[in-house]
Amino acid sequence: MMSRWMLKLLVWLGMLPLPLLRGLGWLLGFLLYIGVPSRRRVVQTNLAKCFPQWDAWKQRRQSVLTFVHFAQSWLDRGWLWHAPPSVLRARLQLVGALDVLAGNAPTVLFAPHFMGLDAAWTALTQQVPRRFSTIYSPQLNAAVDAWVLAGRQRFGQPEMVSRLDGAKPIVAAVRRGAPLYLLPDMNFDPSESLFVPFYGVSAATVPSLSRFAKLGRAQVVPIVARLTPQGYTIEVLPVWQDFPSDDMEADTRRMNRELQSYIDPMPSQYYWVHKRFKDRPNGEKPPY
């Protein structure tokens, strides 16, 4: 019952002017930073391992900003999934190499875990005249699961493929011309992962970007979402050349290198609340 009331509150807050909503995000983010020390340690550990050149003040500031952007992006889902379409078009700026999404070429979209990942998905499904596909992991709470699923299906009748269904329906969707919105940059099952460098630290990384691009005979197009005072800017980057290769590990190393170049200009907008280095090679002790 509490979840349903919380969701109704999010929808109501989404009706507020964006500057006021973002101000509430600052307050909520700071409260989360103070009030959830276990997750604060995760963020600080990730930043310390990936940016050892930062001094203590910069690391602390970026940690706070990570929680602020996390809170702002969650509050934004109230308007992303419920505001009139005209509001979304005004707040979601889709820029970059949009021509690569024209036609029906098999495409895998490399969509890293920036805080604006749902804003990017919403912009694509609303503003690009193609049917998209993505892999969906059910939420633990039934009410939240229904809300998230409905929000992500708001525009364009996308194909939502359950992670439990395996690779076949995903590859079939790509080959039919439904671009796959793929978020492969997290520490998932180590048995399905390769240990490759991420900011110089060995990180368990699923090679699904290379695998699905090869199986789907697809081009790879990166999508980078940036939270801004006006809403979000979603940049479609050029197609990666010579990808995938015949070396899945080399492809996965390249993915992490490219990802670093996307994170560096806006490190606090990346999803550092995730235990990115949870699984370690050769019995190495986890850093958390």
Image (spheres, helix red, strand yellow):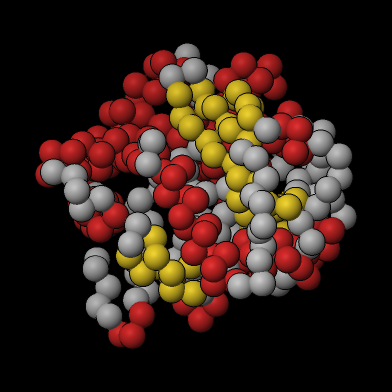
Left or right of residue 193, residue 239 in this image: right
Q: 39 or 265, which lies in front? A: 265
Q: Is residue 71 visible?
A: no
Image quarter where the C terminus lies is bottom left
Picture coordinates of residue 7, whole percent (x, y):
51, 38
The residue at the point 27 percent across, 73 percent down is 286
Q: Is residue 142 above or below residue 100?
A: below
Left or right of residue 132, residue 16 in this image: left
Picture coordinates of residue 145, whole percent (x, y):
58, 52
Q: 100 or 89, which lies in front? A: 100
The residue at the point 57 percent across, 20 percent down is 91
Residue, far bottom: 282
Picture coordinates of residue 213, whole percent (x, y):
71, 61
- Residue 198: name its quadrant: bottom left
Q: 60 or 250, which lies in front? A: 250
Q: Is residue 120 above or below residue 215?
A: above
Q: Is residue 198 above or below residue 9?
A: below
The residue at the point 63 percent across, 27 percent down is 95
How many numbered marks does the figure carry?
0
Q: Is residue 183 above or below residue 222?
A: below
Residue, far left: 56
Left or right of residue 3, residue 62 in this image: left
Q: Is residue 196 visible?
A: yes
- Residue 275: name its quadrant: bottom left
Picture coordinates of residue 106, whole percent (x, y):
80, 52
The residue at the point 52 percent across, 59 percent down is 254
